[in-house]
Amino acid sequence: MKIVIINGSARKGNTLAAINAFIKGASEKNEIEIIEPDKLNIAPCKGCGVCQCSKGCVDKDDTNSTIDKIAAADMILFATPVYWWGMSAQLKLIIDKCYCRGLQLKNKKVGTVFALYNIRKTERRVWSSMGVTLYNKKHE
Ligand SMILES: Cc1cc2nc3c(=O)[nH]c(=O)nc-3n(C[C@H](O)[C@H](O)[C@H](O)COP(=O)(O)O)c2cc1C
C-alpha cells in the first residue's frame, strides 16, 4: 500500500517522533512518502474555483505535484501539532489545496496523529468536532 504522510509540524519534535514510530511499524509492508508543507512553496487556496472546471490548481507552485502524490496514495496520514485547539496552518494549507482534486481522494484510508501539550485543556468537544474519540481512560 502507498502511504503518504503529511507532516504539519515544522519542528523535529513530537509530531515527527510519532510519525517515526508509525514508519517503524508500517515501512516493512508499505511504500511511504512524507510531505513536509513547511519545506514547500504552496500558496493558500483563494477559493477561485477554477480548479473545479480544469485539471488542477492554477497556482504555479508546488500545489499540483503535492496533490498528485496524495491522489496516488492508498492511505493518507494527517499529522499535526495542536495549535489553538486545531490543526497547524501547514496541514490546513494542504487540506484546503486538496479541493482541486477532492473526488480523487474519496475512499482512501486515513489516519491522524496529533501532538499536543494539554489533553485536558484541549476540550473534548474539540476532539469530537475533528472526528476523534478519546479512549485513554487516564484522561477521562
Ligand atoms: C501556536 C501554538 C499553539 C498551541 N496550542 C495548543 C493547544 O491548543 N492545545 C495543546 O494541548 N497544545 C498546544 N500547543 C502545544 C503543542 O501542540 C505541543 O507542544 C506539540 O507537542 C508540539 O508538537 P511539535 O513538537 O511537533 O511541534 C500549542 C503550541 C503552539 C506553538
Image (tube, grey):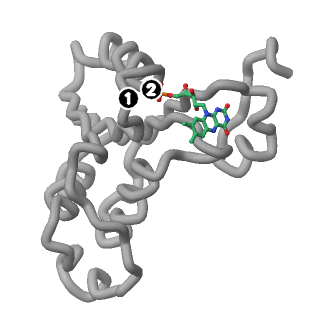
Q: State yes or no: discs 1 and 2 in contact (Cβ < 8 Å).
A: yes
Q: Position of residue 89 (x, y in %)?
A: 46, 52
- Which residue occupies 35% across, 58% down? 105
Q: With 78 as the anchor, is 66 left or right in this view?
A: left
Q: Residue at x 71, y 34 (%)?
A: 133
Percent across and percent down for residue 50 are 28, 87
Q: In this rendering, would 75 be left or right of 41?
A: right
Q: Which residue is mark 2?
A: 15
Respond yes or no on whether mark 1 lies under 8 Å from ligand 1: yes
Kindly state the secondary structure of the residue where label 1 is placed. Answer: loop
Q: Is mark 2 within 8 Å of ligand 1?
A: yes
- The amino acid beneath tag 2 is Thr
Left or right: 60, with 113 as reference point: left
Where residue 23 sits, quadrant-wise, is top left
Q: Which residue is mark 1?
A: 11
What residue is shown at x 22% (from left), y 29% (from top)? 32
- Amino acid type assigned to the residue bearing label 1 in the image: Arg
